[in-house]
Amino acid sequence: MLSEFDLIKKYFTRPTRPGSGVQLGVGDDCALIGPVADQSLAISTDMLVEGRHFLPDADPASLGHKALAVNLSDLAAMGAKPLGFTLALALPDADEAWLDAFARGLFALADAEQIELIGGDTTRGPLNICITALGTVSPLAALRRDGARAGDDIWVSGNLGDARLGLEILTNNLSLSDELMTIALQRLHQPSPRVALGQALRGIASAAIDVSDGLIGDLGHILQRSSVGATIEAACLPVGAALRSQGEQTQLEFALTGGDDYELCFCAPPVQKEKVMAAASKAGVTVTRVGKIEATNGLHIVDAAGHKINLRSHPFDHFALS
Ligand code: ADP
Ligand code: MG
């Protein structure tokens, strides 16, 4: 049986990448990070709990990816550049096959996004993964939730609703073709945090948030913080091939209220349209205009003819469902 310290050494200690800004990583009482002139530290924590955020038999490599991806998504939504992260891990036992796969999934994404694991904590307990990510962003250019203004376009990156479709495959045995099933499950298990897009939108977007709990709920946070309303055009919502295999009502419901997409929802004045498109193409991500910010409060969904649509379901809220 591996001791706690052997486990940390074997699976979570690596040389720090030169030029990363990390002066001291795993192994001391604290990590040390060099101050970055004129930049703020952007700090975000997200926890993944077995039975709540993932199923008990979840693949460990995907869990490693996803635990970091959801935190990188928060940095992306702020326009921050990833710097380092800590990993607090409760494990039922020191299962080496599990740890090996988990660390592989985690570090593959960490390497791709150039973020360093700088410390953490390891303890025995029900499986629980808590990551705190640090990034840097100029305080003037950070993409906050409170900057949306009436008349701004509302944009989203990528496609919406695929992760919700993946959950349906796992929990309700929904069956699609192998190809579409793979897309939906991949989107659920291995979301792509839009880190490059977030940074490319600095100075262009007026507000941003990442879509973790469904577009309506997350856009709602921007509306509340910015004291504005919005109209979403249902026909404009970006729906990919997998979700398009479903009926229209399901497409609409999953695209608007499905969780776990980790796309960015952002606002920008219409004059910024060309710059938004250029930022997206630089980041290698599609973006779609889905509506506009209104001066009066409230969020309305309209069809192609401009008529209001009422929805069956509400955005996901961890405490609404016990
Ligand atoms: P402390 O007693 O100061 O809490 P620990 O004995 O818990 O330190 O951890 C030893 C070192 O290993 C620290 O630098 C800590 O940040 C790091 N560490 C512990 N668990 C992890 C982990 N899961 N991933 C990365 N680093 C870890
Ligand atoms: Mg400790």
Image (cartoon, rainbow, N blue to C red):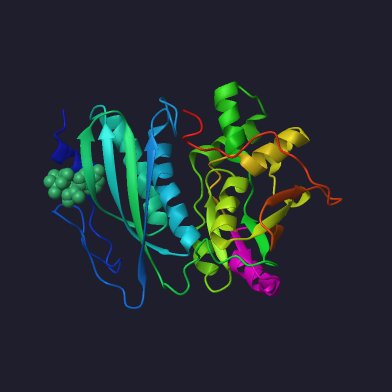
* 43 drawn magenta: no
Where is residue 125 shown, x and y percent of the image? 25, 29
Left or right position of 266 against 93? right
Q: Residue furthest top?
A: 173
Where is residue 54 shown, x and y percent of the image? 44, 32
* 271 drawn magenta: yes
Q: Residue at x 30, y 37 (%)?
A: 100
Using the rendered view, name the quadrant where residue 48 is placed: top left
Residues in magenta?
266-286
Above or below — where is 197 with respect to 254?
below
Where is residue 249 shown, x and y percent of the image? 75, 35
Q: Residue at x 69, y 70 (%)?
A: 273
Can residue 12 be seen here? The reply is: no
Q: Residue at x 37, y 60 (%)?
A: 114
- Look at the image and tell me in which quarter the N terminus lies: top left
Q: Residue furthest right?
A: 305
88, 242: nearer the viewer: 88
For ligand 2, which image quadrant applies? top left
Using the rendered view, name the quadrant where residue 5 is placed: top left
Can residue 300 be seen here? The reply is: yes
